[in-house]
Image (cartoon, grey):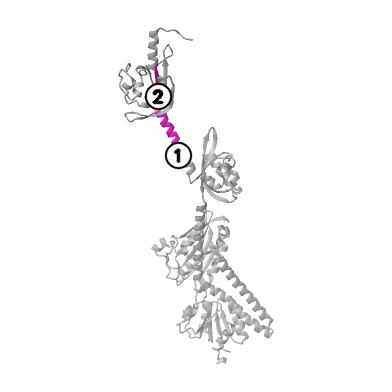
Amino acid sequence: MSVALPVETLRRLFGDFVRHVPMAAAAFDREMRYLAHSDGWLAAHGDTTTRDILGLTHYEVFPEIRDEWRELHRRGLAGEIQRRDHDYFERADGRREWLRWLVAPWRDADGAVGGILIYTENVTEQMDTRRRLDQRESTIRDFFAQSPLGLNLCRMDGLWLESNPAFLRIIGYTHEEADGGLTYWQLTPRKYDAAEAAQLEQLRTTRRYGPYEKEFIRKDGTTIPVRLNGFLIERESETLIWSLIEDMTEQRALEREVEEERLKAIQASKLAMLGEMAAGIAHEINNPLSIIELFAYTLQGALDGGDAATAREAIAGIRAAASRAGKIVQGLSRFSRESQREPRADVEIDAIVTEAIGLCRARLAGDAIALTVDVSTRARVEGHAIELTQVLVNLLNNARDAARGAEPGWIRITAHDVADAPLVEIAVEDSGPPLPADARDRIFRPFFTTKKVGEGTGLGLSISRSIVERHGGTLDLDAAAPCTRFALRLPVVRR
Amino acid sequence: MTEPVVYIDDEPLLCRATEAILGRSGIAVATFTDPLAGLAYVEAHPVAVVLCDYRMPRMNALELLQQLARAVPFYIVSGELDVARLAAGNPRVTGVLTKPFPAEEMLELVRAHLPTAG
């Protein structure tokens, strides 16, 4: 249906219609003279004036119009409709713009082309926004693909959705195998069940989890140590988990190396200690050997003389001496055994005190040093018996060196439960001269020693402290004590 | 009755074995596990020879010798590795008997200081 309007009304309508088009729009006659244009036309072409251009040709108004545009105009006049959604355009003033345009012919009452209509819209801003989004997306894509850290997105039920190459390298699966096909749980050893539950709880309450150290089972069946961190995100109303996965293989190897070095240092220090104790140990062994020799001689005589009572006494003496020598040798071999990778066990405080005293007793006796032992605890600690014995032997040896020559010479070793704390304290005190003030601060440092050259390595206390700290305890010089007193405190597993 | 041999050692079994060996050989012997008791005995009685362990509680053999006013043949008996070095240069130490030693060596050494052997 069409409404018949007077020509003058139609002319005005056409003028208003074109003027208010919210883009750059203009109508031309066959000579490219302006018949009408929208308000935004001049501004869209970089012209800030409000000059009257009706009747002027397009090329008079904008002499910079390029040949290719003139060609578009000619083709429009030839009856062709042409359009472009984004076309790059460099203005005479150097501005770069993206244009969306349409060039179409208009026809007169006879159906002949009367001129053309041009519509252009500046879409530079949209284009810039789109480019920025593209760039951001490709940045994120590159980050995901090239990150040395494993990245993985999974569903709450553990199904993997997106895995980056670093993560795929860690688990040894391809993208096709992993994403959409594998779950977190399939690659998690069962021994982590309890830890997993704790991490899930943390994720539920804080929306984050980790740092969490565990292992994954790789495609080849081997396990690989990893450290995970992660957080929840919402995507299309579904809750998903992003995880950052770090391959800890090298870190673990490094830690193993450090641990081996530590064990080597402990062993070296122990051997140095054994060297210092050699004289006392020789005494401890030679005494039973002498007893055996003398009683064997007695036994010989008793047999020749038919003296059964003396023979029996000699045999009993020989057996007692052999058993004692055996105990000393066993104590020594227990002590010098490398404590490598020995699992932690319950250690009775009473037992390690007895063991340490057994190793040091002869040495103390020979120097006329009185030893008092006061163990009032039945506590057990978790750890390595040999290492803890080594600490006590070290403290006893130091005490012996300090108390030797003191008048009177004594050493006191005590072990008792600490009131109000799940700790046990073992203390070694001696009657030696007080430590000089400057030595007190430095005594736990490696290579520091107050002993004469050749008598101490200066490593005993620093290694002892490192052993105690590895057991979650402390080893300190008791500054408040009236004598030299080293106190060793360890967490108790049970009393 | 001959003057006894004195054996001082904090190890009771060694004292006992020495008693048995010397006793069976007809040699009078007095043994002490406490160095101070041994020292007191030697100060107060005539003795033929003293055999004394080096490493003992409260004092070692050299310290005991230092406190001993009398001149007596004095042997240090020891399982220490360096006692010979410690005793060297001390004119009051007659000799060192290193543990472990054959019983014959002790008998020979003791007999050298008994009048019957002279």
Question: Looking at the picture, which amino acid does disc 2 mark?
Answer: Glu
- In primary-sequence order, the first of circles 1 and 2 is 2
Residue A415 location (% of width, % of height): 53, 61
Report the front residue among A278 and A156: A156
Q: Is residue B31 located in the magenta-colored stretch of the structure?
A: no
Q: Which region shows up in magenta? A: A114-138
Q: Which mark is residue A178?
A: none
> Circle 2 marks a residue in which chain?
A
Q: Which mark is residue A121?
A: 2
Residue A300 sits in quarter: bottom right
Question: Does residue A97 appear to the left or right of B7 in the view shown?
Answer: left
Report the front residue among A173 and B115: A173
Question: Does residue A431 appear to the left or right of B99 in the view shown?
Answer: left
Task: Tally the marks.
Answer: 2
Q: Residues within 10 Å of mark 2 (few under 14, many from 20)?
A: some
Report the front residue among B44 and A98: A98
Q: Label 1 belongs to which residue?
A: A139
Question: Looking at the picture, which amino acid does disc 1 mark?
Answer: Thr
Q: Give me the C-alpha separation between circle 1 and circle 2.
A: 30 Å
Residue A319 location (% of width, % of height): 64, 75
Q: Residues within 10 Å of mark 1 (few under 14, many from 20)?
A: few
Residue A284 location (% of width, % of height): 55, 73
